[in-house]
Amino acid sequence: MRTEARPPRRIWPWIALGSVAIVAAAAVVIAFAVNGSNSSETPAAGPTTQAPQPSSTSVPDSAPTGCLGGSARDAAMLLAAQQQAQHTSNGAVELTASFVRWLYQFPQPTGEEADQVSAALFASTAAPGFTDLRAGFAAVPNSSNGVVADGVPFYRSTVPGVWHIESAEADRVTVSVGTAYVIDGALSTTFRSVSTFTLVWEDNAWKVEGGDIQRTTEEMFQIGTPFTGGC
């Protein structure tokens, strides 16, 4: 497994650049898409504002809200989003956003939740190690990649968030999602991340097959389309 990191660019200093690792056969999904500043300097805490209030779930095949499945960040939300996501590119965007909201948080999901999601969310064509979420959480207890200190509660919010479809076919869509960090209950105006996943339509549902490095956070927030709501 290798991780690509880029130092922040000067033109948008308020954005912390994200990094996404490429998954080898024995890697796990948590390590695959760890995001956050990986510059040579220790990330400093930026200004914060009140945490965002979640919107309601989206109307099927409406413009992506970033909140499909509800405002919770548990396995029930994610599996509900998978059931609700339509067989459209917007449906793939919504499931990706829900997956990112669930995956990157502390305290982490329980082992039981990880097993439940692993069994339902991944495509049959996904690499075996990529699907072992329980092992992934154990191996990477802090998925902020140094943005947030160990033990400090955080999650990634689609408020303010953006999405971008990298490629789309009838049964395969690659989606990038840009999110903001909520650290100890406050929305950071400094730290942003981007995650890219490929989803395939299988067994009448979108499932995650893998991912790849696609965008820096700066690029993502320049080209991305804002979610209409967010959680």
Image: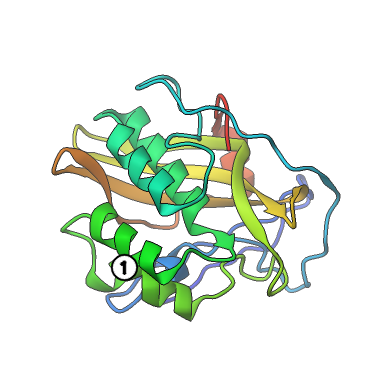
- Number of marks: 1
Kind of element beneath mark 1: helix
Residue 166 in view: no
Question: Which residue does the numbered mark 1 point to in the structure image?
Answer: 130
Question: Where is residue 201 shown, x and y percent of the image?
Answer: 20, 41
- The residue nearer to you, when weighing 58 against 169, is 58
Crowdedness near tag 1: few (<14), some (14–19) or many (≥20) residues, C-alpha within 10 Å: many
When the figure is inspected, residue 157 is found, relative to residue 229, above or below; the finding is: below
Question: Where is residue 150 shown, x and y percent of the image?
Answer: 69, 75
Q: Is residue 119 left or right of residue 48?
A: left
Question: Where is residue 170 shown, x and y percent of the image?
Answer: 19, 32
Quadrant (top left/top right/bottom left/bottom right) for the N terminus: bottom left
Question: Where is residue 16 shown, x and y percent of the image?
Answer: 70, 55
When the figure is inspected, residue 208 is found, relative to residue 224, above or below; the finding is: below
| Residue beneath the point at 34% across and 46% down | 79
| Residue beneath the point at 40% across and 67% down | 22
Quadrant (top left/top right/bottom left/bottom right) for the C terminus: top right
Q: Is residue 101 left or right of residue 204?
A: right
Residue 229: quadrant of the picture: top right
Residue 26: quadrant of the picture: bottom left
Q: Residue furthest right?
A: 47
Q: Is residue 177 left or right of residue 181?
A: left
| Residue beneath the point at 48% across and 36% down | 70
> For the residue marked with disc 1, what is the amino acid?
Phe
Residue 116: quadrant of the picture: bottom left
When the figure is inspected, residue 151 is found, relative to residue 224, above or below; the finding is: below
Residue 71 in view: yes
| Residue beneath the point at 45% across and 21% down | 63
- The residue nearer to you, when weighing 10 against 86, is 86
Q: Is residue 114 left or right of residue 73?
A: left
